[in-house]
Amino acid sequence: MSFNTLGLSDPILKAIEEKGYTEPSPIQREGIPAVLSGKDVMAAAQTGTGKTAAFTLPILSMFESKQRAKPNHIKALILTPTRELAAQIDENIAFYGKHLNLRTHVVFGGVKINPQMMKLRKGIDILVATPGRLLDLFQQNAVKFSQLEILVLDEADRMLDMGFIHDIKKILALLPKQRQNLLFSATFSDDIRELAKRIVNDPVEISVNPKNSTAKRVEQVLIPVDKTNKNALLSHLIETNNWQQVLVFCRTKHGADRLAKHLNKKNITASAIHGNKSQGARTRALADFKAGEIRVLAATDIAARGIDISELPQIVNFDLPNVAEDYVHRIGRTGRAGAAGHAYSFATVEDKKPISDIQSLISQIIPQEIIPGFEPSAKVPEVALKAQKPKRPKKPKQPQQGGAANDAQKRPNGTGANTPNNGNAKRANQKRRPRRITPQ
């Protein structure tokens, strides 16, 4: 099958040809016609399989002959969790839409809001946005939604992980009821399906890969090592294998900074990218890495969904992630678009639980390889897969008592004149409070 058979317009097909693509990926083969049909769509596919093009290409094609957006209005909204991913989607839209007369823009935090407001005054056909900055612009009366025709939630699972559910609910309440809704994600957890009930209507559901599977062309290896030898092991692997481009994931911002500083002292050019860096610094570091001007990019999980390099040869999990699902997205930065890739994960004796969680999630044992000269002082256990426990049905919630007791529960931290002195109400409210992860 070729792109010519999917119903895309001639200007889009011309841009695809100029990009050098000839055959659509599975998610594109199924997703593009579904979006062009005008129906709501829920689509799940592995990271690196072309999800972005699966929704941007048909939207651009549909908007080719539509009337332009009015001042401060938008016609299509693409919501995404991170600045890097928003910028990546905007780059794709700019390229594939270069033969069209469409106004597109991207907005996110960390930069001045006034230039974004000025751009929106002209009216934007396709807007890519992070949730927080979009709400800021709405509060400034810089963006209006009455003309909106299409809503896209990209990487919806990551948005929930990062605590954006309240912002998403606020945005949904502002949008027209009649619109086309598209949910594209690497995974569809139970939480995503619960969110989908608020958004999609009788959707076309597409899943081209098993849940939480990893790309087959990515070779995965666990490397046992003592925690104190991680820096030296990474330097050894880079120099011995002559790696010219490697993305390294660290668990913390300070850890990424320390690693980049260590590598530069070893004459291995490196930069760090994380939430404490200014947007300008993050953009420069990513651009330098893509251009090959630095060999190593040390990143927190903010980069797991925002780096698109078609032939990134390898990634290293310097620290295993706290959340097993992040492992899938991290290693999805290599082996993209059908290319082969390598994912190396440093493992210490303290990593038994994350190893177990990751292997159970992806339903496979990751082989271990000990590097001579860096043998760990204690054996890293080879963890067997955990049996998946059947989920218990949720118990129906008991109706709360009305009156003053109920009013007290609605107050912050469960405080109020009628709060029990034993603190149970306070703890109950704390448990109900949704988890919010600060973007790295």
Image: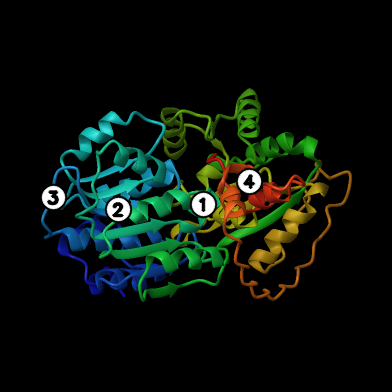
- Mark 1 or mark 4: which is in front? 4
Work out which residue is located at the far top of the displayed protein and give it: 265
Instruction: Evaluate if marks 4 and 2 touch, with contact meaning CB atoms under 8 Å apart.
Output: no
Secondary structure of the residue carrying tag 2 is strand
Q: Can residue 320 be seen in this view?
A: no
Looking at the rendered structure, the kind of residue marked 3 is Asn
Q: How far apart are marks 1 and 4 (CA)?
A: 43 Å
Task: In the displayed orientation, state which residue is furthest to the right.
Answer: 378
In this figure, which residue is indicated by the disc labeled 4?
Answer: 414
Q: Residues within 10 Å of mark 4 (few under 14, many from 20)?
A: many
Give the residue type at disc 2: Leu
Q: Which of marks 4 and 2 is nearer the N terminus?
A: 2
Distance of label 1 from label 2 (alpha carbons): 25 Å
Q: CA–CA distance between discs 3 and 1?
A: 32 Å
- The residue at which mark 3 appears reads as 101
Between label 4 and label 2, give the one nearer the viewer: 4
Residue at image mark 2: 77
